[in-house]
Amino acid sequence: MKSIKMFLGLQKEDIKRKLWLVLLSWYILGMICFLFATKTVIPAGEVRSLYVGPGNTSFFAAMVIFGIVMGITGFSYLNSDEKADLFFSLPFSRQQLYLAGVLNDLLLFLVPVLICKLLFFRISLSMGYSRYEDSAAAVWIGIMVLILGFLFLQNLSMLAHFLTRNIGYTLGLLLLFLLGPDLGLHLAEKMMGIFIPSFYRSETLELLKDYVSPFSLLKNAAGIEGYVDGGQWIWREHFSYICVLAVLVLLLSCINCVVFTRRPVETKRGVFTFSFVECFVRYGCVILAVLWLADALQIFAFGGVSKGLALGGVIFGIPIVHGLINVVVSFDVRKFISGKWHLLGEYICAAVLLGIFFLAGKAGGNIPEKKDLDSMAVVLTAIDSGDRCDTALSQMYLTGDELSAAYEWVAKNCIKQQDVNGTEEENYEVLVNYRFKKGKEMYCRYYVPWYALDGFGDVFGGEEFKEGMFSCLTGDSLKYYEIQWSNGVETYQLDLNEEERERLWEAYTGDFAALTFSDMRQQVPVGCFTLCSTKNQGDSTGYIYPGFTQTQKLLGEYGLNGEKTIKDYRITKILADKYMETEGLLYHVRSLEWEKEITGEEYVYELAEDLHYEGFCVDTLLNQKNPYLEFTVYYRDSQGKTVNSIKCRAQAAPGENEVLKELMKGNGSF
C-alpha cells in the first residue's frame, strides 16, 4: 500500500512538470469541438475534418502533434546531468520512473481525447451530420486508433530522445525514424526503374510503403485518405494496419523500457548515448544518400536513364556525404576528412546496394511465357479518356482470346525504355500487368512505335478490355445515380426515372461496344455523360462519339440535341493564341508568340467547323491536336442574352480549312 502511494506521488510530481501540456491538450482538442459547433453547413473540401470516425483529419493532426511533443518532453530531465542525478537518486527503480512518465503522458492525451471525441459526436448528431446507429461503432474505433497512433509516435519520439543527448539531435534522429523508411522505399523504386528497363511498379514495394512508412501506416489505420461516413467505414479494410500498429506499440514500449534502464547518465563526448546509434545513423544516411545520388543525376540523362551517371554519382558523392556525417556527428568541422575505415565501409555498403539492383535488373524485365499467365491487363496511356492507369491495371482481366490478342501484340511490338533512348520516331507508352497462375503479379512499362498502333485495334475491341479501361460501362444499376449530359457548351441534369436512365445507358453501352480503335483515333467526342452518385459512391464519366446513333436518338426523344456542337451556337468572336517552345538544357520554356482576334462572321464560322471543346480533347496523342494553337470561343447562350467563352483546340492538320491554314502560318487579318 505504501509503495502504491509513493508511486502515485511520483505521478503527481511528474504531472506538475507537465501542466503546460495539460492546458495545451484541452485547448486544442476543445477548439476542434468549438469550431465544429459554430458551423451551419459542411464546407466544401473540409468533409474529412468533420467526420466523427477514425478518418477525422483534425483529431489525426492533434494525435501526431501530441505524440511527438509528449514523447520528446516526457523525460526532459535527461538533458541535464543535475536533474537526471536528482531523479535517479529517488527511491524508485528506473522501471518505475519510466512507467510513471509513460502513464502520465497517456492520461494527459486519453482523457481530453475521449471527452472531446464523444462531445464532437454529440454535436454531429444534434446538427444532423451523422446518425447514431451508423456512426457509434466508428467513433469508438476512432478513439482506439487515436490512442494507438499516439502511443506509436510517443514511443518513437521517446526512443530518439533516449538515444541522443540534446534536443537538436533528438529531432534529427526522429526525422530519420519517421521519414527515412518512406524516402528509402521511394528512392529504391526509382532505382529499380534505372536498372530494370521495363519496371513500372512492384506489389512488394507498395505493400512495404503501406506498412513500413510510419505516416502511411497511421493514415491507413485511420483511413483518412478518402471520406466515408460512419456506416461505410469498413473494419476489415483497416484491420491489418491496426494490428501492425498495436504490435509496433508493444515492441517499441519494451525497447524503450530496456534503453531507459540502461541509458548512461553521465555526459560523454559525443551526441549519442550508445555507440551503435552512430553506426545506425551513419550507414542509414549513407544508404539514403547512395539512392538519392543515383536517382537525382538521372535528370541529366535527358528523359532516359543512365547506369553510368548513377555509378559516377555514388563514387564521387560518398566522400562528400561521409565528411558531412563526420561533421554532424562530431560537431567539429576539422573531422571532415576523418574516419577512413568508415569511408571504406560506406563504399562497401554502396557496392553491395548497387550490386543488388544490378542483379535484379539482369533477372527481371523479360516478357514471361504465355503458358504461365492466368490473365493480363494492358493500358495504352495515350487513351486518357479511360480510367486512371493504375485503376485500369487492377480492374482489367483479359482472358481467353483477348489474352492471346493482347499477349501477341505486346510480344511483337513492345520495346523497353533502353531501346527507345536515342530514337527519333514517336513512341507510345504501354503499361502491362501480368497475372501468373501461381498468384504473382508483375507490372511492366514498354513502348510501341507509332506504326504499331494499328494492331492495337484487336485488343481494344474486346469486351473485357473496354470494361476494364472504362469503368462507366460496368455499372450494375443506376438506381442511386443521376445522369448529367454536356456538350462542353451546355450542361444539363437529365430529369429521368430509373427505367429511362437504364434505357439510355443500355443504348450508350451498345454504341460504345461497337466503337473501334480507329474511330477513337480519328474522332473527337461531341459530348459526355457523367454518372453522379446520390450515395457518395463516386462519379464516372463516359464520352459520346459522333457515331453513337442510338444514344443520340434517345437524347432527342428526351428533348436534347446531342449532336449540337460549338459551331451551332451564335459565336461573336474567336481569340487565337500561338505558343512556342524554347528548348533548354533541362526543360522547355513555353511562351506566347502571338495573339489574333477573329471577328469576321465568315471567318469565324469557317474556323469553328474544325474546333473542338478542349475538355473533350483528352486523347490528344491519338487524335493529333495542334499543341501550339489555343482558341477561346466567345458565344451567346441558347437565349442569346449572355456571352460565355470556352477553350477549344484544332486538329494538327488543317485540311481544307483556309482560316486555320493561315493561322498556322501566322498570316492573315480576320
Image (cartoon, helix red, strand yellow):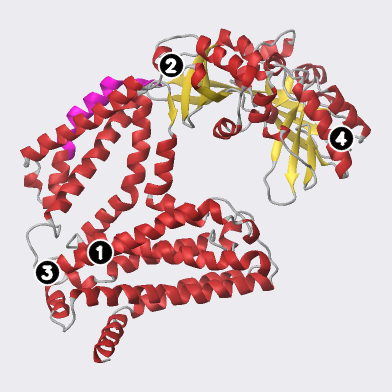
- Mark sitting earlier along the chain (1/3): 1
Q: CA distance from mark 1 to mark 3?
A: 15 Å
Seen in the picture, residue 37 relative to 535 is either above or below; the reply is: below
- Majority SS type along the magenta span: helix
Q: Which residue is at 25% across, 34% downward?
A: 290
Disc number placed over residue 265 in the picture, else none: 3
Quick check: is 306 in the magenta stretch?
Answer: yes
Inspect the image, locate mark 2, and give the three-letter code of the amino acid beneath it.
Lys
Tell me the quarter of the picture where residue 319 sits: top left
Q: Residues within 10 Å of mark 3 (few under 14, many from 20)?
A: some
Disc on the earlier residue, 2 or 4: 2
Q: Where does the image place residue 85, in percent across and percent down from the top left?
A: 12, 77
* Dots 1, 3 in contact, CB < 8 A: no
Q: Is residue 554 left or right of residue 73?
A: right
| Residue 631, x across and y down, in percent | 68, 25
**Is residue 645 toward the left or the right of residue 272 in the image?**
right
Residue 14 colored in magenta in the image = no
Q: Are marks 4 and 3 in contact (CB under 8 Å)?
A: no
How far apart are the two marked residues, 1 and 2, measured between alpha carbons? 49 Å
* Labels 4 and 3: the sequence-earlier one: 3
SS at circle 1: helix
Of label 3 and label 2, which has the lower sequence position? 3
Query: Which SS class for mark 2?
Result: loop
- Judged from the image, the secondary structure of the residue bearing numbered disc 4 is helix
Circle 2: is it few (<14), some (14-19), or many (20+) Cα within 10 Å? some
Q: x, y percentage for residue 333?
A: 10, 47
Tell me the CA gap for discs 2 and 4: 45 Å
Instruction: State the mark number for residue 256.
Output: 1
How far apart are the alpha carbons under marks 4 and 1? 65 Å
Q: Check contact, mark 1 vs mark 2: CB within 8 A.
A: no
Badge 1 amino acid: Asn
Query: What residue did someone put label 2 on?
Result: 416
